[in-house]
Structures are given as C-alpha cells and as structure tokens.
Amino acid sequence: MKAYNIPGHLRLAILSILVVIIGAGCSVTRGLKDNQAIVRKVTIKGVDKEFAEESLNYIDKEQQPNNWLNLQFYYLFSQKGKRKIGEAPALLDSNLVEFSRLQIQKYLVNKGFLKAKVADSIIVKKRKAQLIFTANEGPLFKVRNFRDSIADPKVQELYRSTRKQYTHLNKGSRFDTDSLAYDRDQFYQVMKRNGYFDFYRQYINYLPDSSFNKSVVDVVMTIDNPEGKKEHPIYTINNTLITIARSNGRTTGKADTIQVDTQFRFVDFSGRFKPRTATDYVFQRKGELYDLDKQTLTTTRLSELNVFRNVPNPTYEKLSDSTNRLNTKIDIVPLKRMTDRVEAEFLFNQGRFGYNLGNTFTNRNIFKQAAILQVKLNWSILFDNGNSAVNDGIQNQDFRAGVSLIYPRLLLPFKFPNLAKFGVPHTTFSTNYQLFYQKGLVERKSFINSITYDFFETARKQHSVTPINIEFSSGSIDPVAREELLRQNRYSYVYLIGRKTFTLGSQYTFQYNANELNSYKNFIYFRGGLDLGGGILSLLSKAFNAPKDTLGQRTLFGFAFSQYVKTEIDYRWYRSLGGEKQLIFRFNPGIGIPYGNSDQLIFEKNFYTGGANDIRAWLPRTLGPGQFNRASYGTDGRADTTRARLKYLDQFGEIKMVANLEYRYKLVDNFFGAKLKGAMFIDAGNVWRLHKTADNPNGEFKFNNILQSTAIGIGTGLRFDLGFFIFRLDAAFKFKDPQFSGADQWVFIKHFGEVFGNGSFKEAYLRNNKTGIDASGKVVGDGYSFMQLNFGIGLPF
C-alpha cells in the first residue's frame, strides 16, 4: 500500500469528477414507460419490533427499493442492462407483491403466530410506488409440553444427554419452526460425531398438536429406526488409503507405495511426498468412532498446507462383513512445486518519483515434507526532481534479500503434542539482509536471523514465539555529512545511524479473533507483541568481564550490543450495523525502552507513523515526534542541507499512540464486476521521544501535553471488492497538525481556502522548510500538503 501526494489541481479534478458522476441524472424514473412505476418505498405495519427488520427480507428482491447510487450507475453505465453494472430499477409487479405478502405471512406463522394474516396495498404517485403490508399477527403460540419418542435406546440416551447444549425448544418458549429446524440439524451433527455414519436428517420429525383456542402447542419429537433394523448402526474407522496424484490430476505410471502402519497405506504418483506429510493431518484413527468433525478437520488442514490443489472430503467404504467398519480413501492433487512472482510499483510524491521491483520464488515442497522455501528480492529507488539542492538525482535506494524455510509442524528437540486441531503449526527459519543508502548521508546494512514457532491454542487464540532472534546492523556516514552533523552538535544522529551493533533476543506475539477479520460480526480483535533484546548477552558480558568501548558500553566479539524491551498492542472493536455496514475502532499503542548497555534503541526498532494503514493524512515518517517542527533547524544554508539530509530519518520516537475510527458501508452491488463500498474515517495519534532531546525540540512525551501533540486526520474512501481481493482508494486531509502551536494547529479550519490551492500559509511553510535554492534563485523543498491519496490492496485494518 502506497501513499501519494497529488498536486492541488489534480486533487480538485479527481473530486470534481466523482461529484459529477455521482450527481448526474438524479431522476429515478427516467427511461420508464407510461404504464410502469418504480418501487421506492416499502412499509410493513403490525409486526413486532423483534421481527420487523427480518420480515423485510421476505419481500421479493425485485420489489425492494433500489439503492439510489446503484440505480444511477445502472442508468449511466449499463447500456439498458447490456452490461452488469449497478442495479436495474425495481418495477412494480402485482404478482410479485402478492407473492411477497404470502411470504411475510408464512414467516410470521413460522415464528409462532399461527393465526397471522397479512394484507397489502399499493400507492402510485408520479410513477413512484409505495408498497404497504399490514399484518394482523394474532396470538403468539407457545410450547405447552414437549416429549421425545425415539425407538433406539442408545440414540434416545444420546439425545437426552446432549439436548440441553443446543435446544431452543422448551416449555413456555415460542413455537418457532426455525427453532425446530435448528434443533434437528444440531442433533444430526451430534449423531455424525458419534459414529452414526448412515444417519440422515429425515429420521428426525416433529409432530405438533395445537389448541387454537388456548394458543398452545404440544410437540412430540420422533426418531425412527432404519427400515428393517432394530437400531441405528455405529461405525468405526478401519484402514486408510491416501493417494496423491500427479500435478495434472492423473494417477498413471509408477507410484511410491508404502504401508506406513496397520492403518495407513500411502500411494504417491508424484514421487514428491513422504507419508508423514499427509498422515500427520488425518484425524480419524483406526478403531475410533466415525466423526464428521474429524473428517472436515482432515480436509481443512490438508488444504492449509498450501501444497495441494484439490483436497476433497474423504470417502468411506463399508466392509462387507457385519463389523460396521469403514475404510477411508483420501485422494489428493498437488500444486505445482515451484512458482515465481514478480511485482512492480511506480511511486510519485511531490516531484519525487521512483520504482519498486520485487521477486518471490517459492518451492512448495522441499525435503518431501511440504516445507516451503521462499526467496525474496526487493529493490526500490527514489529520484529527486529538483526538490533539494543536496539530493538531486537518486535520493535513496533500498535493497532487501530474504530466505525463509517454513515447516508445517513444530520442530523441537523434545516431544510435543500435535497442535493441528485448530490450525497448522509452523516452524520458520529465516535470514534477511537489507542495504539502505541515502545520498549524501548514510549507508546502512542489517542482518536478521531468526527461528519462529506459530501455533493455535484454540480457533481464536494464536501464538507466535521467536526464541532466537539475532540482529546485526552497521552504518557508514558520508564524511562531509558527518562533519556537518558534528559541527551542529548532532551527536545522537551520528551515533544512531552510524554505529555498529548487534543483539540477541526473543519475541512473542499473541493474536485473538484473527479468524473473524473478514466477517461482519460483532467482535474484538487483539494483537500484542513483546520484543526483548540483549538480556542474555548482558549476562554473558558480565560473567566473562567483557571489555567496554569508548562510550562505556560492554562489547562482545568487538561490537557493542543493544539491550532493550519493546511492546506494541493492536486493539480493535468491530460493530455490525446491519447488512454490510460496519463501525471499527482501533487503538495501537507501543513503547520501546533501551536500558543496561544501551541509551538508544536500534534505529530500526524505533516507531514512526503516517502512511496508508496508519494516520493517512501524512506520508510515512513525516509526522512527529510530538510537536517537533523541521523549521526549527533554521533558515540558513546549513539548516537547508541538514533538513534535506535527514528527511525521513528524523521523525521517529520510542513511544507511539494511534487511534482510528472508520465507518464502512456498501454503495453499489455491481460496479464493473466489483462491489463498490465506501468509508469515512478519523485518524489520530503521533510518535514521541522517550526523553527530551536537543535534536527533536518539543518532541518528548508528556502526559499533560498529549492532546496538544496529537495529530488528527479526516477522510473518505472507496473500496472495490472483487471477492478475492480489495482495491482501496482513500483521500485523507490534515485536520490538526501538532507541529504548530495553539489555534494554528487546526490547519483544515484556519487555512481551508488553501486545501486545494496556494496561499500565504503554504508560501511561508515552504520558506521555513526549504532544502535549498536552485540555480535560478527559486526556493526548493517540500511544500505543505493538506491531502494525501492512498492507493493499495486490502483494508487498512
């Protein structure tokens, strides 16, 4: 996801085009014939509040009022229905109105109003129709008595012992046929989990006996035995045959055939897998009762290995004897072993432009164990188009290379239970290298090597443990820049970006409800992480009395090591507002504290804010810390040079707090093959320095100054939902900017006239934040931008 700074006239043009498109042709009746009317309003009267909203769903879809925007897109782009764009007008149809009346009446009867009657009326004015459905619910029927009549004693015992866990049908409860269907399905699932392979829903019946005068119902639940049998048979698992085809789906030629044990026979026509790859994720074991949940779990986990293209549900064959045993067959088709993906992006930002090239090579099945090998390369380069007297030409480059080996199990030196019930566990070995170069300032290199274990405690709780994380980083500062920074007494920057350091640490992350993130339910999501570095190295250095460097820091292998603790939390509150409307609140605080052998965090461990998934009105690394203003460097040539050299490097902090509030809603069901959705949002927060520093005046964290040093951005956006991914466009505006003081912080209000144009405020800002003067005498530098456009794939959170 990238943030772009678009010139003012282009921003105004983009918004104007959107307004013209949305506002064009406001009439909803254009194109209708004289004898046609469009349904614009539906009213249902006489229905209890509990059922009023649901009853609207029983009106035929073609008689439900159109979304205004859906309708406008249909008129504008569909060419009278030739293209599937928008939504065709809901034309009044008396037959469908009658059908809807009957459906609403049936719904009320199913909800216990057995005497319910519904009448309809139609009002048409100026070819706009209003439908009115008036219900007379009558008395609500309740259950007076309930009993079961089950022929098989074992089934009866199982039903009576589990009924309280799921039933909606009790004495005094509303007589609801939906509840009957729910109870039937729940007990069907119970039977399927307890060995009853041949059991069907049709065996379960409900016999209601109602007394219309007393508005009560007596219910009898019956379960019949199979025809010609005295009981329902219970089945156990016998042998399991696992067959892996070739990638083209064929099972021809020579196959690797192995009898793994008394249960599993493994046949691999691809020759690419060891038996354990599949057998570890088959949860039905020999001698166990047949269990539908374990059948589904087997299919799900084998699919999640990401090495198989087609994993259908296991099939079962009954043995011909009378032992009620089942042989299991699992037929699998693997994915292609190797893939390669190339990605490219073009970047544009305030006269700067560049590109980002990436390549990911994946081997999906190394060592025949479904282990995944990934090799990632990424190179990005940013050019300066005359915005700086220092960085003319290439401004910075960033090269990254990484190798990861991911096993679908926990590789531990001791025996550990199989934790695959709620998700496939993983062991990841990774090594990464990064080379960052900023012209005229620094060249930084870093190596990170780690081992990480990921596993699920439950379907909602996920743990990630990195017991070993080794990091080494070094920086080489341009000699001219170094002398200039030292001359200005900016020792901390020289130390921060130019030092060599390493650390050995551990990390832990806990996630809750990550499986709900794509749903419209009411839920809370939580992600918390803890990063500890240098503790073991500190003990070793003291035990061996390691030497100290000129700054008084202990060294190992000739390098000072870093010692710190860092934690970050991501808390989100999701609330469904009906349909595809959703309100989300997010709070994302974090803090990093150097201690012991360190007085500063490693540069890469600091927090920064701004960007497409954060505070969207600011570009990444251009906000904070606190009330720090880059104009504080001064206005002479030396200050201009410093401002240019330190851009994107001087706005960080050890403390971070970000809050977001976003309202999401659907606009159009079909917009050129995608659902068009909208969003409105408010972002707030900042980063702060842990202590007062000369390099970032007013950048330190103070409790009594949180509100004044907090940035606020507002905005709106569009989401193009294609099902398998979402393309996002957000327009965000700076509302409150903490780099200013007092009333001047409310930039959107005070300088609204310059949001899409130029004026005295922007001119003064450029003079105070210039990075040089070009050959023609023109001031160059980064001007003030109120609006940021963010393009990307996926939701921000």
Image (tube, rainbow, N blue to C red):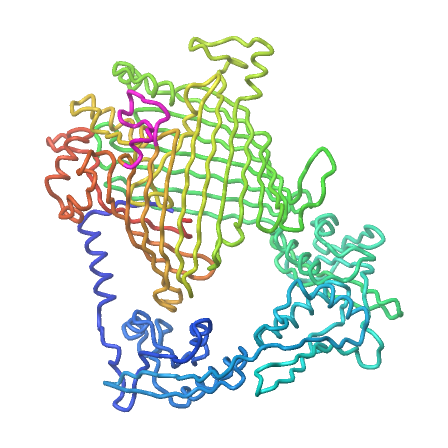
- Nearest the camera: 687 or 638? 687
Expressed as whole percent of the image width and height from the top left, the position of residue 61 reads 42, 78
Q: Is residue 421 above or below residue 785?
A: below
Q: Is residue 620 above or below residue 318?
A: above
Expressed as whole percent of the image width and height from the top left, the position of residue 697 reads 26, 24
- Nearest the camera: 424 or 510? 510
Seen at 87% across and 70% down, the residue is 320
User: Magenta stretch: residue 700 in it?
Assistant: yes
Count of residue discs: 0
Seen at 51% across and 83% down, the residue is 106
Residue 205 placement: quadrant = bottom right
Expressed as whole percent of the image width and height from the top left, the position of residue 95 reads 41, 90
Seen in the image, is 329 located left or right of residue 323? left
Seen in the image, is 323 located left or right of residue 255? right
Q: Is residue 184 above or below residue 730?
A: below
Q: Is residue 766 above or below residue 259?
A: above
Q: Main secondary structure of the magenta part?
A: loop
Residue 292 placement: quadrant = bottom right
Q: Which residues are magenta?
A: 688-707
User: Magenta stretch: residue 38 in it?
Assistant: no
Seen in the image, is 605 located left or right of residue 41? right
Expressed as whole percent of the image width and height from the top left, the position of residue 507 reads 54, 32
- Nearest the camera: 626 or 272? 626
